[in-house]
Image (cartoon, rainbow, N blue to C red):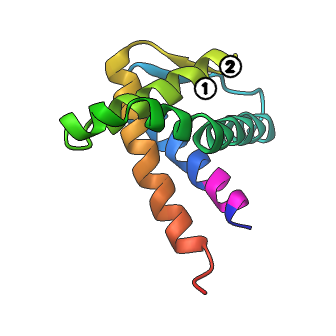
Amino acid sequence: MNFIFTILGNMAGLWVSTLIVPGLAIVQGTSRGETFVIYALLGLILTLLNMLVRPILKFLTFPLYILTFGLFSLVVNAIIISLAGWLSNDLFVSGFFAAILTGLITSVIASLVTGLLADRR
């Protein structure tokens, strides 16, 4: 169930990011249903990249995390967002600053949504 909540959080984060970040564009569908499906697929891609690629990147860049006191995580977020845009034809990121800002906004909102919806056992 947490996997679904994470997808929903990433969807919400991407939606808010498209409203705030000027260098980010997501292809809109012809109807609300198609637009929702596009956000759902992008949320799924972002969730899978965060689960599979992020741990590898964190392991490979561990010395940079230590040298920058954890600020290198912003760069890893930007890499994940750019990779999601590369894998999908629906997400367009027009620069590294836009990717950093999108990664920051998406991770904060996804954490909030997941924290609010997840079970607390």
Q: Are marks 1 and 2 in contact (CB under 8 Å)?
A: yes
Q: Nearer the viewer, residue 88 or 70?
A: 70
Instruction: Report the magenta residues as a range.
Output: 3-8
Q: From this viewpoint, is residue 67 visible?
A: yes
- Please give the residue where the numbered disc 1 appears in the rendered image: 84
Residue at 66% across / 51% down in the picture?
A: 7
**SS category of the residue bearing label 2:** helix
Disc 1 on helix, strand or loop? helix
Residue placed at 51% from the left, 28% from the top? 81
Q: Nearer the viewer, residue 63 or 52?
A: 63
Q: On the rendered structure, is 71 left or right of 45?
A: left
5 inside magenta stretch? yes
Q: Mark 1 and mark 2: span between their CA atoms?
A: 5 Å
- Say which amino acid is labelled 2: Leu
Badge count: 2
Q: Residues within 10 Å of mark 2 (few under 14, many from 20)?
A: few
Please identify the quarter of the rendering in which residue 88 is found. top right
| Residue 111 location (% of width, % of height) | 47, 59
Q: Quadrant of the N terminus?
A: bottom right
Q: Which mark is residue 87?
A: 2
Image side of residue 98 versus residue 43, left or right? left
Asked if one can make out residue 21 in the rendered structure from this viewpoint, the answer is no
Q: With 36 as the anchor, is 47 left or right in this view?
A: left
Three-letter code for the amino acid on which mark 1 is drawn:
Ala
Q: Residue 104: where, in percent of width, then height?
A: 37, 41
41 is within the stretch colored magenta:
no
Q: Which SS does the magenta portion mostly show? A: helix
Residue 32: x percent and y percent? 74, 40
